[in-house]
Image (spheres, rainbow, N blue to C red):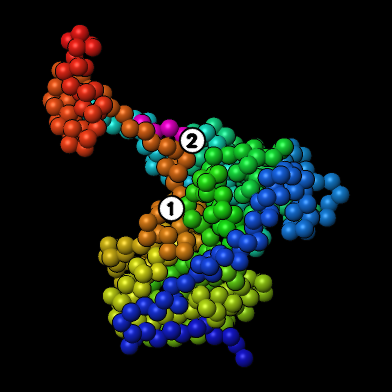
Amino acid sequence: MNAQANLHDLRSVDAVPEALLARTEADLSSFLDKVKPIIAAVRTEGDAALARFARDFDKVTAETFSIRVTEAEFEHAFATVEPAVVEALKFAIDNIRRFHEAQKPEEMWLKEMQPGAFAGDRFLPIASVACYVPRGKGSFPSVLMMTTIPAVVAGVERTIVVTPPGPDGTVDAGTLVAARLIGIEEIYKCGGAQGVAAVAYGTETVPKCEKIVGPGSPWVVAAKRLLSDVIDPGVPAGPSECIVLADETANGALAALDLIIESEHGPDSSAYLVTNSMAVAEAARAALPDYWAGMEPGRAAFSKAVLTGPHGGIVVTKDFEAAVAFVNAYAPEHLEILAAEPMGVLGRIRNAGEVLLGPHTPVVLGNFVLGPNAVLPTGRAARTHSPLSVFDYMKRMSVGYVTKSAYDALAGHAHALARYEGFDGHARAVSDLRKKVLGD
């Protein structure tokens, strides 16, 4: 008997059930306990712990294991990856770079707040960033591109990559090719919690960094949380999640095709088709088994596990307004809108990492080649967080400059507020004493 996706009929329900909003990473308590000794080992043992964890967790069996990727490994990657893939990487890199160059702010702006009094912002790149590229359930040169290109555009002085090694002790060849095309030369073979700890504290080989960005498993998310006072953990990016929002005009078979995209990442992903049309829901549900049958068995198993499990399936609402409300409550990482007027629906969406409009903009294009960053907030973090961007690799400092002629107008008001708040030193610094000291 063919597996069938969950069908959640909410047509008689006013509030979204909390169970449908949950993600696999919502409760990290068990991972936090397991991650603590890993972090402690990396902090005290450094490279020795990384080598041991590579054997224990990544099943590395190679007799010799280099934590840092060597020049020979880069050269072998270029000899291995098919020319069509290299061209696709170049195409994607160009789009992603152009998007983030357009996003980059001017180095400084100043505005005259009052005659002779200026204030503004200055943007500077942060000094060092570690980009985490996962590997456990696939190879992800796309993640390397999305995390490193905005760092290069921002002008980060030192951008490195940490990624799990395969059993042969090597890094995915496509990931190495993408890195060199972008100009990234430092890649270290340490994934999971141990990779996060390595860049938080530094080891004999892996440099200590100020920030880590990139998606990862609950192990990675847990390590970031525990080390957040040591290293900036960046955008909350856990297991993949997606909503396909469809109105009654949508093609149910197409909705099912796109529902598979994020659900095939792994059993810890989350994916829903949300629609106000039972006809669309039934058409999508009917199409899924044939799609699964035509897929690579491992990926099909992941998608089935998600869409028949506690974090996926098809949701039918009483009307389209309720469907939009579900999306905003869920705050998905990826949102694809299949509707008669998708641009009109966009204005009603408040919470989503990215929004992809219409039948010709599947999540796949956003993940790989369109240009916007595909490292997006997960676990409902899209309510307050934004996609990874150039701004994540930069810091902003405020700048002020007051001329002598403008000083008096500001000082009087500042003096009054300082006195009201009880700060005598503040008040004296903008009193007549200042003019006396300056000899004005």
- Chain-order first, disc 1 or disc 2: 2
- Where is residue 121, by image quadrant? top left
Where 23 sits versus 59, above or below? below
Quarter of the picture holding the C terminus: top left
Is 254 in the magenta? no
Q: Element type at marker 1? A: loop
At label 2, the amino acid type is Ile
How many residues crowd around disc 2 within 10 Å: few (fewer than 14), some, or many (20 or more)?
many
**Residue 294: quadrant of the picture:** bottom right
Whole-percent x and y of residue 393? 47, 40
Comparing marks 1 and 2, which lies closer to the viewer? 2
- The dot on residue 126 is 2
Q: Is residue 75 left or right of residue 220?
A: right
Q: Which mark is residue 387?
A: 1
Describe the element under mark 2 as helix, strand or loop.
loop
Quarter of the figure with residue 139: bottom right
